[in-house]
Amino acid sequence: MPKARYIMIGGFLGAGKTTAILKLAEHLTSQGLRVGLITNDQSVGLVDTAMLGAHGFPVQEITGGCFCCRFNSLVDAANELSKQSRPDVFIAEPVGSCTDLKASVSYPLRRIYGDDFSIAPLAVLIDPVRALRILGLEPGKTFSPKVLYIYKKQLEEAEQIVVNKIDLLTQDRRKTLREALARDYPKATIFEISAREGTSLTAWFDAIAGGDLGHDPSMDVDYELYAEGEALLGWVNCTVSVSGGSPIDGNSMLRRLADALQRSVEPLGEIAHLKMTLSPTQGNDLAVLNLVRNDHHPEMSHELAGPIEAGELIVNLRAEADPEMLHAAVGRAIADAVGSFAGWAHTIDHEEHFRPGKPQPTHRLTEA
């Protein structure tokens, strides 16, 4: 029996991992392969799971910690997907604030379960505007040094650095970023794509689907500094039921909510990623909205086809700010956005806000 393929696609919050994973899953499916997806977060109620599931792919969600700290859950998720649909390829999306994935996930998976899986190279996606700022190539607000430690460690361990969203850059800015990445991270192969536009995907898809994980020694990681960096980030997840007396444009509601949140969060700290979905109670339609920086504009990657009378709203907010303040800002924004439609009300079904705890890997292999 052939081994299943295990592909892990990392990258910092807001890099566009979920969109890229969806395009890769569709590409592999078109080649006749069965694909299973594994999402990951520090808590429950993920936009990513809802979005990927809405496209018809089998999805397992691992919550309560990153893959490195929930290694056994990762294996269990793969086994559960195998029972459901026997995937030829597993695509896993780790938490966007995690690093040291080769030492704590890929290498242990190959050593312990090498008879079951062939392991792809570790790909790390980046948002190019964020990267230009972090690498000191352009001005603009970014994160504090301890959060940037995590970001740069992600690039250091990458075997493939995938510059996503190239549609946002001129040729000169692309060249500047590509040259800086090649200079600072010479071990990585660099790809330039736009997952949203479907640009230049084939070369990267071929490399990650056909290549193998390398054997370089694991990088050095200061876990105290790593933990301090993660603890500066605030997490808010909430699931909300919305309903009213008459049909409304759900896309407009989602945009109003994003605008309100952007105004509320900007004085508190830098947004790493705001992701929201709105799905009607009846049917399988879905609206998806993303915001990846304070000074960016919210983007709808998918809109509802028609009015809704009731639905489920999922909000995932990650920012370098106090989670109590973020939680309050989210609550006010939801009340204002929903209440702006006559006769509409909301009920909070689930909510969590916190700072991530110190990462404690189940395994860590310093040698490949």
Image (cartoon, rainbow, N blue to C red):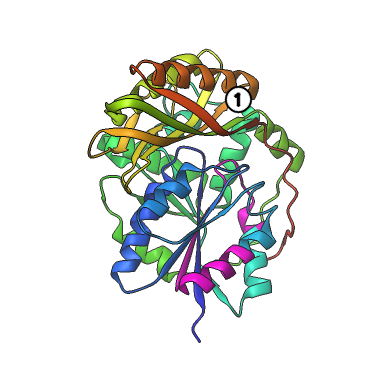
Residue 212 can be seen in this image:
no
Provide the residue span drawn in magenta. 75-104
> Label 1: which residue?
144
Residue 341: x percent and y percent?
Answer: 33, 18
Outermost residue, front side? 245
Quarter of the picture holding the C terminus: bottom right
Say what amino acid the circle numbered 1 marks: Ser
Which residue is pictured at 37% across the width and 61% down the height? 25
Residue 297: x percent and y percent?
Answer: 34, 24
Quarter holding residue 208: bottom left
Helix, strand or loop for disc 1 = loop
Could you say which is closer to the camera, residue 183 or residue 70? 70
Residue 278: x percent and y percent?
Answer: 38, 36
Position of residue 148 relative to residue 203, above or below, is: above
Could you say which is closer to the camera, residue 366 or residue 324? 324
Quarter holding residue 32: bottom left
